[in-house]
Amino acid sequence: MSEEPDDMLMPMLREIRSEIREQLVEMREEFSEISLRLDRLVVGQKTIIQAVMSKFVTGDFEERIFELERKVDSLMKAK
């Protein structure tokens, strides 16, 4: 006759526990990979923000210089 249900319970629970541990390890590895990818995205995002801010600052100065050049030209023509 086959094993009694009481005799099968503990081995089955051990097997289930082992499978859960394996899944947990895999899940942690996947979360670590996702975390690394997110970190790389954040670094890239910061780089883009710095580039855009630099472009705005440079563009603002260029616009001011252009306006000053126009004013100087108009003053030079007025003489």
Image: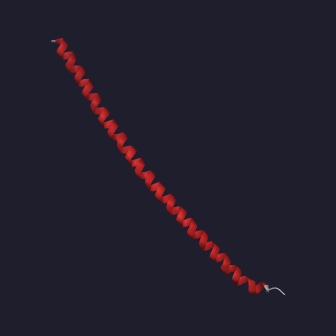
Quadrant for the C terminus in the image: top left
Image position of 20 with respect to 44: above or below: below
What residue is shown at x 46% (from left), y 58% (from top)?
Answer: 36
Q: Position of residue 70 (x, y in %)?
A: 24, 20
Q: Is residue 14 left or right of residue 53?
A: right
What residue is shown at x 63% (from left), y 72% (from top)?
Answer: 20
Q: Quadrant of residue 51?
A: top left
Q: Is residue 27 left or right of residue 57?
A: right
**Front residue of this view, candidates 77 and 11:** 11
Q: Position of residue 59 (x, y in %)?
A: 31, 33
**Front residue of this view, candidates 78 and 2:** 2
**How many numbered marks are there?**
0
What residue is shown at x 56% (from left), y 70% (from top)?
Answer: 25
What residue is shown at x 19% (from left), y 13% (from top)?
Answer: 77
**Front residue of this view, candidates 11 and 68:** 11
Image position of 29 with respect to 8: above or below: above
Q: Position of residue 21 (x, y in %)?
A: 60, 73
Q: Position of residue 58 (x, y in %)?
A: 30, 35
Residue located farthest toward the front when viewing the structure as drawn: 1
